[in-house]
Image: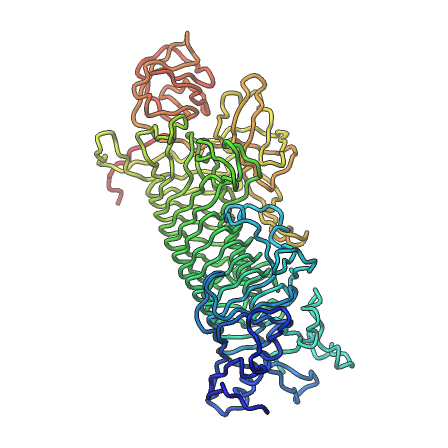
Amino acid sequence: MTTFPNLIGTWVDVRSFAPPDYPSDGNLQQDWQPYIQAAVDYIVNQSLNDPAPTKVATLYFPPGRYRINAPIVVSQKIPETTSSIGKRYTYCSIQIMGDAPPYGDGFNGAVIIPNFSDRPALCIELGRAVKIQNLAFHGLNTWVETANPRDMATHYNDNNYIAKVKDKQGNYIDIPVRDKTYSPYAAICIDPFTRYPDSKEQLPPDPDSKHPLPPDGGYPGMEEYYLPAGYHDNPRSGSSSIQIDNCTIHGFIVGIAISPNGLTQNAENIAITNCSITSVKTAIAVCQDQSRNVILQNLSVEGAKYAINCTDYGKGTGNCPSIFGANIGGVKYIFKTFSFGSTPSINGLYCEACLSIGILGGGATGDGYVFNSCNFALIGTPSRNRVPTKPSIFRLINMARAVFNGCAIGAIAYIPTNAIPTQADNLNDEPLWLLSVGSTIFNNCTLGVRGSDAAPRFWIAGNTWNVAFNECYTFDIPYDITQNPPTAVSPQSSGRIGQIIKLQYSTNLLDDTVLPGAFMYWQDDSGGLPTQLRWIDSKIPYVVLQDVEVTVNDDGTGSFLLPEAAIGLVAPGDIIESHTEVYNPVEQETTAQKKAYDINITVQLGRVADIDSETQLVTLHYVSATATSQTHKYLFARYLPRIHYSTTGDFNPAQADRIINVSHPALWRKNERIRDAHGYIKEGTYIKEILGNTFILSRPFTGSEANNVALYDAKVFQMNTTQVF
């Protein structure tokens, strides 16, 4: 064996295995893979042969650009003498370290550059106490064609996340980028190869065909790597105690893939710290339900469809990792998870220019997700002049149990690249579509977006379980967009949802969303607080539309004709809902996957943008991407009632379309609902215009002349403090 001048004890310089002066400048003609692989094998063999306690050696990469024509594989195969399965993987250990932590494209010490786009750059099979540190991985999936992260987040065509490969001169090369369920193009892949027969009885006589490949054929050209792992009586062991620290990853389908082979257990106790992942379809993929205690700390992700993806690769049953500090931008969905006993804790996550929090999967156990002090600065659906140009998506789909503590969830208007924003574009009338099929609780959170009207800025649909709000606030600031900059026109800067507001869902089609009550202290104009607790009416009002033919357009708009009985009772800003017997809220590619997410719930179709006074044609904006043109049964218009300071007005039957001498008109807004203490106004009637101290109604009242009648929207009750027991 050649002597290695840079081999000192347990520290190995990768240059020791290459010819003298072998260039590491990224030259396309220089393949470092054979020399790196030789160094890895040397260290792994040393650890295997050492008597206990085994020494773990470090493979050192000096600064340089190391091009490889084949994957680097950290593994150890041994003959299996106790059964007929041939070779199998046993445990191995190594530390691979670059010279200094990399950052972005400008500060890179050691960079590994694969010249291929169909296999992982680095594979770890059945690793124990493996550490990868201070390395950069630059792949060939250069899909990001814009530096604007907002454009990255709003792609609606999945092919936009998989680009053709570019060469060093920026020219496209016709090389496919592999995006397969069990073998995606990844920078680092943990346990990619484990395969074994289902039982000994199924062992074929030909030893070369004992270990079937994954359904997608596995990684091309690596068929001989697919072997059993671990002990012969349980040949599906996985890695444990893996650390990936201070690494940057750019230009892959998956940044880090954990156990995509479809069979392995374990792949647990994995810490990914101080890493940056950009220009990928999925940043981190956890591929099976035994991968527990996966910890992400100080993670940065930019330019991806998914930050955390636990359902698209391998078995598709991965547990969501816990997160302790993350900065995520330009991502379409932050989460797409399963749930199998992981109960993740997400702390200090900040996102910007992301389209959706994503999908918190219920999985087999419906585990709890806890979000602490997270800021979700989402991006609005693409629009111009507050008219959408794309369909809307759910900003959160919770199919498990989720608690948000001290979090902010809002959206900013989407302004396309190179567009000159108008004053209207700086506002966002889009409500945040939230769907809760599980249990969702918001504690001390801020919700909603800044807009120009009185309509609700968030809306939650679903059924069967609870959504609860505790001491939450909404961005509820009406703006006058004729001013530059737009100025607030309401004396209330924000609206308190209440100390306790609970949205309770039931299966009753005519009352599928009820509000059991909001307990709150209401501040009056003098700044004082009442001495007794007050309770807001328990009902979220609705207008029944029954079966209505709805037209849905490709740009996120839609329309329907308002039934005669509902004329004057449906207002701009209302949420149109439909009870759907079979509905799939999750983006999936196969019929089987779609069927797995079919549920029976009430969902939003869109937000009323305008009602033609002549034809009664209702125009919808922010129509869900899952909505279709059809006759929707059990259609409803829903709205959130608002609380107003005590107001009175006069009724004159000769002018039944208005209320005159209103005492506090400045505290009301156009399109808000209004009711009266005498019951003259039909529920659902709203204010069409405010002319001084006169309100023009959307529907004439019915009743006799009366003065100083109490006017309100939401009913507010004062609770006494009588002791019951």
When asked about the image quadrant of residue 140, the answer is: bottom right
Instruction: Please tell me how many numbered marks the rendered image carries.
Output: 0
- On-image quarter of the C terminus: top left
Instruction: Please say if 42 is above or below 373.
Output: below
* Residue found farthest to the front: 21
Q: Is residue 142 visible?
A: yes
Which residue is located at x 32 percent, y 17 percent?
A: 662
Question: Toward the viewer: 509 or 595?
Answer: 595
Q: Where is residue 315 in the image (x, y as percent from the top left)?
A: 61, 64
* Residue found farthest to the right: 205
Q: Where is residue 336 in the image (x, y as percent from the top left)?
A: 54, 55
- On-image quarter of the N terminus: bottom right
Question: Toward the viewer: 474 or 713?
Answer: 474
Instruction: Please say if 222 is above or below 168.
Output: below
Q: Where is residue 24 in the image (x, y as percent from the top left)?
A: 55, 73
Question: Toward the viewer: 496 or 376?
Answer: 376
Q: Position of residue 549 (x, y in %)?
A: 64, 29
Left or right: 585 with respect to 430?
right
Left or right: 426 with respect to 226?
left
How is the rendered protein coloured?
rainbow
